[in-house]
């Protein structure tokens, strides 16, 4: 019996990357020419928090997993004062990164709380990402996501456009790697220690 396809058709890996590259190129052009849509991003933390951390990430990147743990500790330290917004820059040599990003955004349409559970679980198990979509589906099912809706939403043009817009924004900013964090406009590139975040946040809170 033929295995059911996931977010991506069962193509050879090289063909899959080529198809994805072409699709993203098209979406980048579309995004650049279209008017800016409403953001619709989910936020971790209080929406009224004075400090916003924008995190550009790749779910298969070990440094991004380290960065996510650091941000979690920082948010606990500044509870109520810091909120997190996740954006995506899936690297082309990480085959599970794009499906993981698509699933995060698709799950967010169902439940922000479940999207953050997914975010934590995927980053807590980086070694499992070699299983690609099988692991991602298991995580989603385990937190009670509507799997049929997830499959539909993860294929939607809106989700692809959102990730393409993130990638374009990242490139235009000139960041040279992930993770990249922007704290109220101040950029921190790489898996920086918590002390670097504390330094920036404390200075911002004095203003």
Image (spheres, rainbow, N blue to C red):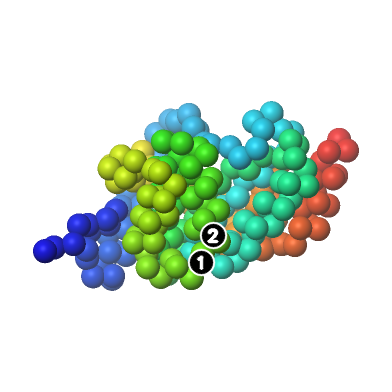
Label total for image = 2
Cβ–Cβ below 8 Å for labels 1 and 2? yes
Classify 125 as above or below 80.
Answer: below
> Is residue 108 visible to us here?
yes
Residue designated by label 1 = 126
Nearest the eye: 114 or 132: 114
Residue at 28 percent of width and 71 percent of height = 14
Residue at 13 percent of width and 63 percent of height = 2
Residue 157, quarter of picture: top left
Whole-percent x, y for residue 67 in the image: 64, 59
> Is residue 171 visible to us here?
no
Residue at 81 percent of width and 58 percent of height = 195
Whole-percent x, y for residue 11 in the image: 22, 65
Whole-percent x, y for residue 187 in the image: 69, 52
Residue designated by label 2 = 123
Classify 172 as above or below 135.
Answer: above
Residue at 50 percent of width and 33 percent of height = 39
Mark 1 element type: helix
Classify 136 as above or below 127.
Answer: above
- Tell me the quadrant of the picture where the N terminus can be found: bottom left
Residue 30, quarter of picture: top left
Label 1 Cα neighbours within 10 Å, binned few <14 / some 14-19 / many ≥20: some
Mark 2 element type: helix
Whole-percent x, y for residue 34 in the image: 39, 34
Q: CA distance from mark 1 to mark 2?
A: 6 Å
């Amino acid at each position: 019996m033929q295995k059911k396809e996931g977010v991506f058709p069962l193509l050879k890996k090289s063909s899959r990357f080529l198809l994805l590259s072409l699709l993203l190129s098209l979406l980048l052009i579309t995004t650049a020419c279209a008017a800016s849509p409403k953001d619709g991003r989910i936020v971790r933390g209080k929406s009224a928090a004075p400090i916003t951390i924008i995190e550009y990430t790749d779910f298969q990147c070990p440094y991004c997993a380290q960065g996510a743990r650091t941000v979690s500790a920082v948010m606990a330290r500044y509870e109520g004062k810091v909120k997190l917004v996740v954006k995506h820059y899936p690297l082309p040599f990480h085959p599970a990164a794009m499906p993981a990003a698509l699933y995060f955004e698709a799950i967010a349409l169902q439940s922000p709380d479940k999207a953050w559970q997914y975010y934590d679980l995927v980053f807590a198990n980086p070694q499992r990402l070699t299983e690609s979509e099988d692991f991602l589906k298991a995580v989603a099912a385990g937190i009670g996501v509507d799997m049929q809706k997830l499959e539909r939403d993860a294929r939607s043009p809106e989700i692809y456009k959102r990730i393409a817009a993130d990638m374009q924004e990242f490139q235009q900013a000139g960041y040279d790697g992930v993770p990249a964090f922007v704290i109220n406009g101040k950029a921190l590139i790489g898996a920086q220690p918590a002390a670097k975040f504390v330094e920036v946040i404390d200075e911002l809170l004095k203003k």
